[in-house]
Image (cartoon, grey):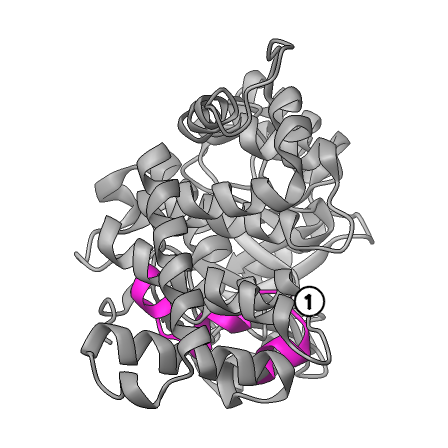
């Protein structure tokens, strides 16, 4: 299966403490066209970096359990949108390009009140920055741009004992030793590690929406309110589900008054199927979606008939995820690492283990026999009949759309 070429999602550079232990990771903007932050604008760069960090499919971010340092622009601060990240996991960098106007200072105070921490990055040590120094947790100093005497003078200007001092652009051992002896708390630069480009696959918004909804729907007890909120945030999906709920399959004497009525009328089992169907069709071509959904549905039907019985929902999800590479053009193994699914389901998908693994393997055999018209005479006639009936059922769902 062909997959999308890997893209540059971002870059990262570690920050170490005085004991050379990893303290945090600074995230840096990168793209495939070689454009810089100044080329595309700081607000867009911040948004793209966050989007790629949280949605990119990659196996290179396992070390991001430490806090992350992220640059933001003045416009981003003034928007009061706040970062969609737990404040305890991020340090917001205020770079020297920001002018500390009263509006910026008020915005930083609002962010600080929400729990965000700030680092002042190579700023001017003038009086106009003092209000921001009072809100900062970290002072970053580019040690290549100042003499040790100047830096010591700057430190004496900032008397707060709660501030952490970070030496950046530490390129060699003597520089590290000099600022370690000076009392600096954190260190960043080529002496410790160069920035590492993080490569991965960017999912389309429709694929991301599908993944989020599947995560909400395929749990033992779905949270109705969160499901309704997720559907409501996607107007196209919401309208499609309203059309389905008004179709002859579900039409009821009472009128629909909102997305909640759709969820109640359809029930979670049917909603899972329809969300999957609509999401997959939007993310890929109709033919690919039909093949993968037929596989998922036959897995569910086989689970119902298995002895001992297997969970039809788990079997359906296994059938769906077995087509992740075809649906989203990503490596299946990497995609699965991003999902919170049971070890049993992982074993079924990667090794064909367990009851669901056997069901999935049987679904593959039926699919191959019917599509390639090979070995049909050796297949159980009842299974072939079930597969064909399932194919017609899935096609009927497509027609209903």
> Is residue 378 or residue 177 the one in the foreground?
378
The residue positioned 56% from the left and 17% from the top of the image is 103
Is residue 325 a member of the stretch shown in magenta? yes
Q: Which residues are magenta?
A: 324-347
Please name the residue that numbered disc 1 is placed on: 311
In this view, the residue in front, 97 or 386, is 386
Left or right, 362 with respect to 116, comes to left
User: Which residue does the image show at 42% across and 27% down from the upper left?
Assistant: 240
Give the prevailing secondary structure in the magenta stretch. helix
* Residue for point 25% across, 49% down: 286
Q: Place residue 153 in its image quadrant.
A: bottom right
Residue 203, horizontal then vertical, whole percent: 36, 54
Q: Does 189 sit left or right of 217 as displayed?
A: left
Where's residue 262, x and y in %? 60, 25
In this orientation, does residue 10 appear? no
Quadrant for residue 108, please give it.
Answer: top right
- Badge 1 marks a residue whose secondary structure is loop
For image coordinates 38% across by 73% down, the residue present is: 384
Vertical order, 392 against 359 (above or below): above
Does 336 lie within the magenta span? yes
The reply, left or right, for residue 127 in relation to residue 398 is: right
Residue 170 position, x and y percent, is: 48, 74
């Amino acid at each position: 299966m062909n997959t999308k070429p890997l893209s540059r999602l971002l870059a990262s550079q570690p920050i170490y403490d005085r004991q050379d232990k990893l303290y945090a990771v600074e995230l840096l903007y990168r793209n495939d066209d070689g454009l810089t932050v100044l080329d595309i604008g700081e607000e867009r760069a911040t948004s793209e970096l966050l989007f790629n960090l949280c949605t990119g499919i990659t196996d290179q971010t396992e070390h991001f359990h430490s806090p992350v340092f992220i640059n933001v622009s003045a416009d981003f601060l003034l928007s009061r949108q706040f970062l969609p990240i737990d404040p305890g996991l991020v340090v917001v960098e205020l770079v020297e390009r920001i002018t500390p106007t009263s509006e910026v200072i008020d915005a930083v105070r609002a962010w600080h009140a929400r729990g965000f921490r700030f680092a002042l990055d190579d700023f001017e040590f003038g009086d106009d920055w003092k209000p921001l120094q009072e809100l900062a947790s970290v002072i970053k100093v580019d040690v290549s741009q100042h003499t040790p005497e100047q830096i010591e003078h700057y430190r004496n200007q900032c008397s707060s004992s709660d501030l952490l001092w970070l030496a950046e652009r530490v390129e060699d051992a003597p520089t590290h030793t000099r600022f370690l002896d000076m009392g600096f708390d954190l260190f960043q630069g080529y002496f410790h590690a160069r920035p590492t480009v993080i490569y991965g696959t960017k999912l389309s918004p429709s694929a991301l929406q599908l993944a989020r909804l599947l995560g909400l729907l395929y749990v033992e007890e779905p949270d109705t309110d969160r499901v309704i909120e997720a559907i409501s945030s996607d107007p196209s999906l919401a309208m499609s589900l309203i059309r389905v709920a008004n179709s002859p399959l579900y039409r009821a004497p009472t009128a629909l008054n909102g997305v909640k009525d759709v969820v109640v009328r359809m029930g979670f089992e049917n909603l899972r199927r329809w969300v999957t169907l609509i999401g997959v069709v939007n993310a890929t071509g109709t033919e690919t979606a039909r093949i993968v959904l037929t596989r998922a549905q036959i897995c569910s039907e086989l689970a119902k008939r298995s002895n001992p019985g297997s969970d039809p929902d788990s079997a359906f999800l296994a059938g769906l995820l077995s087509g992740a590479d075809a649906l989203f053009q990503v490596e299946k193994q990497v995609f699965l690492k991003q999902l919170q699914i049971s070890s049993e389901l992982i074993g079924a998908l990667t090794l064909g283990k367990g009851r669901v693994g056997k069901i999935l393997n049987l679904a593959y055999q039926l699919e191959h026999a019917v599509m390639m018209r090979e070995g049909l005479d050796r297949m159980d006639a009842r299974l072939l009949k079930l597969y064909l009936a399932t194919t017609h059922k899935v096609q009927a769902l497509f027609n209903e759309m």
